[in-house]
Image (tube, rainbow, N blue to C red):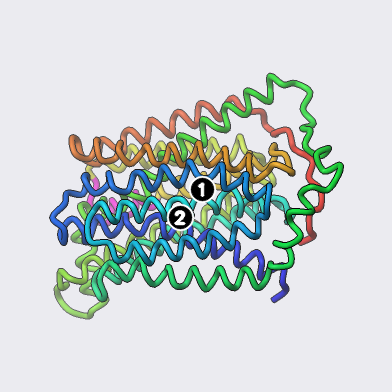
Amino acid sequence: MTRDRLHFLLLNIGHFLDHLFTLIFATVAALALHREWGVGYAQLLTYATPGFFAFGVFALPAGWLADRWSRDGMMCVFFVGIGVSSIVTGFAQTPLQIGIGLFVIGMFAAIYHPVGLAIVTMKWRNMGIRIAANGVWGNLGVACAALITGFLIDHGGWRMAFILPGIFSIAMGMAYWALRHGAIRSDHTASRTPGSAKTDELPISDRGIYIRISAIIFLTIAVSSVIFQSTTFALPKVFDERIQGLAGNVSAWLQGVATADNADVATAIGSLAFLVFAVASMAQLVVGAALDRLGARQVFMIVAFIQIVFFWLMPGQTDAVAFAVALGFMLGAFGQIPIGDYMVGKMASGAHRARIYGVRYVVSFTALAASLPMIAFVYDRWGFDTLFRILAAAAMVIFVAVSALPRRLPEQQRANVAAE
């Protein structure tokens, strides 16, 4: 494997770990802590909310530091920092302690998106498919959070779900530093090369069009984040309520017995959630290829329509039907992810790209964090059926907003792009 390919692989592993760490607690809260600590599911969500706000708010300073110092250096900080904070969180004894741990995890998790995506969109050609491939790794992290955590709840306890990935992340940080330490030393000097600022001007003559496109991009990013967070965070609990029969049958089939032991149902639910996440994440590859051919407007409208249909179908469904419909709306939820990064990458300034992605993820993850209290509020009063109707309305907002985009986005000139 060439150093260039290894670099892309480590960036992809970073995206995998970023989403895994931020969603470990979703499965832990749904399947273990509310029983072990005697704390309600809705109450536990309040302890995760500050961590997701940190996930958004710290994206901007992370991007600023990356542009001012070193993007590769910030990736090393990400791997080691999130690993250490996850290990410490695994030793929490109270909800407050785990909330503090999740906040620190969120701070380090905020580094990846503005920094990692700035590297991906600047270094390689075929932006759409590169972003999509990187996105698949991130969503496999989402999927494995449910799978790994469900397995460890049954066979080792929830604390190992924080500790073992933390150790692995530190090892990846050391590998990244070994590969990129020369680039880290030279990044600061290269960022101050005279004349580099000249590439920052956008070739857009009509400022009004630029402002309109930017407003639509950030509106759809915010609403898409609410949809993504609501579906990925709540899905383990939705499955815990809606597909117990299917999960019991799957567990019994895996064990080769007539009935499943209740202790292994969590593993079955985690496995089914993993299956949905893993299959749905493949939609990003299709979307990424379509973006390079068709542009953002047409692709985004199709994805939004898929979400509208399946969110309206979900209320009242259970077991196999609920599983199939969940797969449908998760295809849309995952498929929309590379579109926002593609639109920002097309229009963002190269010299300040990490900072612009930082702004993008402040918007995205602030909306993402705000969705947790919304999930808790709606679930506590009306249940998940109402949540799905709200998400269908949100997808309709995206559909209408995207219809106002031009067929092709104005594109920022990019320099120093590596060959594939």
Residue 308, given in percent of the width and then of the height, sits at 41, 36
Report whether 215 appears left or right of 99. right
Q: Residue at x 74, y 37 (%)?
A: 411
The boundaries of the magenta stretch are 317-327
- Which SS type dominates the magenta stretch? helix
Quarter containing the N terminus: bottom right
Q: Quadrant of residue 412?
A: top right
- Name which residue type carries label 2: Ala
Circle 2 sits on which residue? 280
Report whether 151 appears left or right of 109. left
Q: CA distance from mark 1 to mark 2?
A: 8 Å
Q: Is residue 253 visible?
A: yes
- Above or below, comparing residue 266 to residue 408 in the picture: below
The answer to whether the residues at label 1 and label 2 have Cβ atoms under 8 Å apart is: yes
- Name which residue type carries label 1: Gly
Mark number, residue 335: 1
1 or 2: tag closer to the N-terminus: 2
Magenta segment: does it hold 274? no
Q: Is residue 243 visible?
A: no
